[in-house]
Image (tube, grey):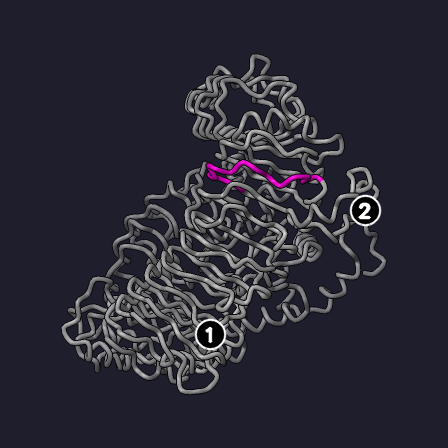
Amino acid sequence: MWDLPKEDSGIILALFLSYHYLPSHLKRCFAYCALFPKDYEFVKEDLILLWMAENFLQCPQQSRHPEEVGAQYFNDLLSRSFFQQLSTEGYGTSLTSPELSIERHFVMHDLLNDLAKYVCGDFCFRLKFDKSQCIPKANRHFLFAVNDVRCFDGLGSLTDARKLRSFFPITEIWRFYYDWEFKISIHDLFSKMKFLRVLSFCGCLDLREVPYSIGDLKHLTSLDLSNTKLQKLTDSICLLYNLLILKLNYCSRLEELPSNLYKLTKLRCLEFKNTKVTKMPMHFGELKNLQLLSTFFVDRDSELSTKRLGGLNLQGRLSINEVQNIVNPLEALEANLKNKHLAELELTWKWDHIPDDPRKEKKVLENLQPFEHLEHLTIGSYCGTEFPSWVFDNSLSNLVLLELVNCKYCLCLPSLGLLSSLKTLIIDGFDGIVSIGAEFCGIYSSSFVSLERLEFENMKEWEEWEYKTTSFPRLQSLYMNSCPKLKGLSEQLHLKDLCIGDCDKLIISGNSMDTLSLELLSIQSCPFVNIPITHYDFLEQMYIHSGCDSLTIFPLDFFPKLLSLVLTWCQNLKGISQEHAHNHLKELTIQCCYQFESFPSEGLSAPWLQRIVIEECENLKLLPKRMQILLPSLTELWITDCPDVEMFPDGGLPSNVRHMYLSSFKLIASLRETLDANTCLQSLSMENVDVESIPDEVLLPSSLTFLRIYDCQNLKKMEYKGLCQLSSLELIQCPNLQCLAEEGLPKSISSLEIVDCPLLKQRCQNPEGEDWAKIAHIQELDIQ
C-alpha cells in the first residue's frame, strides 16, 4: 500500500494507512462522506440520520439505539481527525438544518475528502463537483448543489443509474428557501429506481404534490420534502413500511399529516416545523419507535393528547405547541417529560393567549419539568407571572442554552444566575420588566459563572439594569436590541463582542465598558450612543448603522488592530481622520514601501485594516489621506451613495485592493489614474451609476476580471471593448438595458448572470432570442 504510485490516486499515500486500519463499520461510514464536496459544512445529527437510513448503524446486542451507535461512530472518526469541528462562524451548507448553531458544524479536510472519493470510486457522484457531465451507471449516491442543477443537462442520464440509493440536494446553511427545478418526471424517477433509500426534494419549489407511485419505493428509509409547496401528502406514503425518517419542515402550505401515519411503525424521526399543521393524526401514540419529534400539538378536545405523548420513548429534540390547551395541570404530568432523555425542548403557548388563571399556567409549566440532563430549553409566550423553581434552581445542571421569549405577563426575571452550566441566555419580549436587579443574579456572590453570550431583545419598558461586580466572569458577547427606554450599564463589563440596536436612550461610557478587551462593536439605530474616545487595542470589527449622531470625524488612530470598518447612514459623518499617523510618517515614501515584503506597522493608524464599507453618508467629504501608505492591508473598499465624495485622496489607493464597490461615475473614471501598475484589483461592482452606456475601453483597469453592474436604471447599452479582459460579468436590476454590444461578448467571458433585466432577458433567454448567438459560447449562464 505504501508503494502505490502517487500519480494513480493523487492522494497522500500515508492517509491510506489511517483508512486501512479503520474497523469495517467506520470504513463504510467514512466512505459515504465522499458525497460531501470540499469545504462542505455538515451537521452531526444530519450525518448520523443518513448513516441510519443506509443501515450502517448495527448493534448486534440490540442494547443501544441506532442514534447512540451513530454518535459513537461519529466520535470515533472525529477522534481520529477524519472530521474537524468548526471553531468560528461562517457561511456553509447543510442538508436541512440552517438554524443550528455553529458548534454542531463539522468539515473534512480536503485531503481526507479526496481519500473518501478515491475509496468510494464511481459509487458517489457530486454534480458540478466531479468532472464528469454524465452520471455513471454504477452510481449509488447522487448529490447536487441547488444553484448548479439549473445549468446541468445531464439529469436524463440519472435514470440509467437504476441502483441509485441516495438522491438529495445541498444548499447554503443560512438560506431557508432553495428554489430549484427538476427536469425529469418524478414519476419516472420512482418507477425506475426501486432501490432508493434516501430521497430528498428539499427546496424544490415546483413540487406541489407527490405521485402515488412513491409507495412503490419499498426500500425507502429517509424522505425529506422540506421547503416545498406541498399542500397535502398522498396516503401512499404510509405504505413505506421501512421509513425511518420523514421531514416536512417549512412546507408552509401543508395543513395536515396523513391519517394512516401510525402504520409507519419503524419511524424514528418526524419533523414538520413551520407548517400549517395544528393537530396530531389519529393513533399517533402507536409510533412506539419514534425518537425525534420536532413538534407536538396539544389537542384541547382530547384528554388523551398528553397521554399519547407520554407513551413515546422520545429523545433528542421536541417542541410542544399550544400548551395553553392543557386545562388540567395533572394532564401535563402525563406527558412524562422528566423521563424522556431529551437534549432540546421547546414549550410554546399561543402568542395571543390571555390566561384565565396565571397560577394554573405556572402549575402546568411546573409539571412539564424535563429530563435533568437537558441541554437546550426554549419557553415561548408563557402566560404565567412567575416561573417554577426548576427553571432556575440548577435542577437542569447540564443546561447550556436558555431562551425565554414573549413572556409578557412576567413582572420580574427568575434567578437565572444560579444555572451553573449556562453558556447562552436569550431574554426576548418581557413587556412587564422595568428594572433588572440583584434578584436576576441570585443569592451567591458569583453568578452566571459559565455564561458567555447574553441577549436582550424587545424589552419595551426596561429602564435600569444593575448587577454585581462579581457577576458574568466569562461573559464575552452582549447583544441588546429594541430596548428603547434603557438608559445605561451600571458596572464595567469585560466583553469581546458588543452589539446594540434600537436603544434610543442608551448611554455608554468608559465606566460601563472595558474598551481594551473589545474585538467587535456594532451600533445600529442608536442616535445618542457615543463611542468613548479612547484606544481600542484589540477591536477587529466595527459596524455603525444609523447611529452615533455625535460622530463627525472617525479617528482611525484609536483602532490599531481594526480589520473591518462599516459605516452606513451616518448622517453627520464628515470625514475619516488619521492625524496621529501622519505625524509618524513624514519620511516614509511609497518607493521605500515597495522594498518591504511586509509593511511596517509602527506608526500606521490601521495597518491591518482589510475592509472599509461606507454607504449612505450624505455629508462625508474626506477619505483617509495617503491611503496607499497608511492602509497597506486594505483589500476591499465600498463607497456608495456618498454624493460629496468625488475623488480619491492624493497618493492613490493601496495596491492590495482587490474588490471595489462604487456608485460614483467620477470615482470609477478616476480608477486608472488612482491605481498604480502593480494593482491587484480583480472585481468591481458599479451600483446605481447614472449612465446610458458602459464600460468605455479606457475606463476600467486592465487587471479587472469580474464586473458587476447593479441597479443602473438608465443603462441602455454595453460597450464591447471595455469587457475584453473580463472572465465574469453580472447584470442585475437594469430595467432599460436593451441589448448587448453588436460584437457580442468577448470569448474571455466564461460566466454570465442576468437578473431582473427584462428587455435583455427576452433577447438572451433561449436560442430564438436576438442576442442568443452572442452568449451561446459561455459555459456558466444564469438568466432570471
Residue at the farthest right position: 3
Q: Which residue is mark 2?
A: 597
Tell me which amino acid carries mark 2: Glu
Q: Residue at x 47, y 56 (%)?
A: 530
Query: Where is the N terminus found, in terms of image quarters?
Result: bottom right
Horizontally, residue 115 falls left or right of residue 123, namely right
Residue 16 in picture, x, y percent from top left = 75, 61
Residue 616 drawn in magenta: yes
Q: Residue at x 49, y 74 (%)?
A: 451
Residue 457 in picture, x, y percent from top left = 36, 62
Horizontally, residue 618 falls left or right of residue 137, namely left
Q: Which residue is mark 1?
A: 400
The part of the chain drawn in magenta is 614-628
Tell me which amino acid carries mark 1: Val
Q: 10 Å neighbourhood of mark 2: few (<14), some, or many (≥20)?
A: few
Query: Where is the C terminus found, in terms of image quarters?
Result: top left
**In the drawing, what numbered circle is on residue 285?**
none
Q: Residue at x 23, y 64 (%)?
A: 350
Characterize the magenta stretch by its predominant secondary structure: loop
| Quadrant of the rendered image containing residue 326 | bottom left
Specify whether residue 167 is in view. no
Residue 126 in picture, x, y percent from top left = 59, 46
Instruction: Tell which circle, 2 or 1, labels the residue nearer the N-terminal end.
Output: 1
Residue 559 drawn in magenta: no
| Quadrant of the rendered image containing residue 558 | bottom right
Residue at the farthest top position: 742
Secondary structure found at label 1: loop
